[in-house]
Image (cartoon, helix red, strand yellow):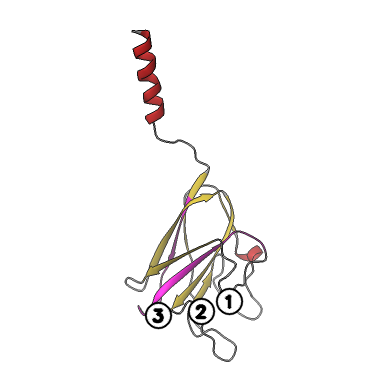
């Protein structure tokens, strides 16, 4: 009888959900897109020196979302706790690149912790990063020039 109880207890503990909270989830939303053309590309960064990244080659993870009602949302799952920054691109022509005019982007861009972007306020990882220690939701403001 003791053996049966011991086996049952072992099975109960093996079947219990993983209570390890070493990874977290980040939900990122962008609102007020100027139209519903194309997609929104969400690039997640986790190292200093990775932003700006005009060619989107230095990112940690990348997600793309369809636009619904001039908004888009993605969820980054299974992230180790740590420092992160987000860069979004309203990729209206869906080519994966920032379209530029003479100097400024022609498509919408945005960075975590940035409400305005300009010559005196250029984003980098140190300015855009935030600490992620639990499941978190953030909104990134889109800027059109």
The residue beneath circle 2 is 97
Look at the image and say whether residue 47 sits in the magenta stretch: yes
- Of the numbered discs 2 and 1, the one sitting upstream in the chain is 1
Circle 1 packing at 10 Å, graded few (<14), some (14-19), many (20+), is few
Q: Residue at x 64, y 81 (%)?
A: 119
Q: Residue at x 64, y 60 (%)?
A: 47
Is residue 92 shown left or right of residue 143? left
Q: Secondary structure at mark 3?
A: loop
Comparing 135 with 114, the one in front is 135
Circle 3 packing at 10 Å, graded few (<14), some (14-19), many (20+), is some
- First to last magenta residue range: 25-48
Q: Is residue 130 above or below residue 53?
A: above
Comparing 113 with 78, the one in front is 78
Comparing 129 with 98, the one in front is 98
Q: Position of residue 118 (x, y in %)?
A: 61, 80
Corner quadrant of residue 54: bottom right
Is residue 131 shown left or right of residue 7? right
Q: Residue at x 37, y 24 (%)?
A: 11
- Classify the position of the N terminus by image quarter: top left
The residue beneath circle 1 is 54
């Amino acid at each position: 009888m003791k053996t049966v109880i011991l086996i049952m207890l072992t099975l109960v503990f093996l079947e219990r959900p993983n209570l390890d909270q070493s990874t977290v989830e980040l939900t990122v939303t962008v609102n007020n897109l100027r139209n519903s053309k194309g997609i929104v590309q969400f690039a997640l960064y986790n190292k200093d020196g990775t932003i700006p990244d005009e060619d989107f080659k230095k990112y940690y993870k990348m997600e793309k979302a369809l636009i619904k009602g001039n908004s888009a949302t993605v969820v980054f799952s299974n992230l180790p706790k740590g420092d992160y920054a987000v860069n979004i691109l309203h990729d209206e022509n869906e080519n994966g690149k920032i379209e530029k005019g003479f100097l400024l982007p022609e498509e919408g861009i945005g960075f975590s912790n940035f409400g305005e972007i300009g010559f005196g306020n250029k984003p980098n990882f140190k300015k855009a990063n935030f600490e992620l220690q639990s499941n978190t939701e953030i909104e990134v403001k889109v800027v059109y020039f």
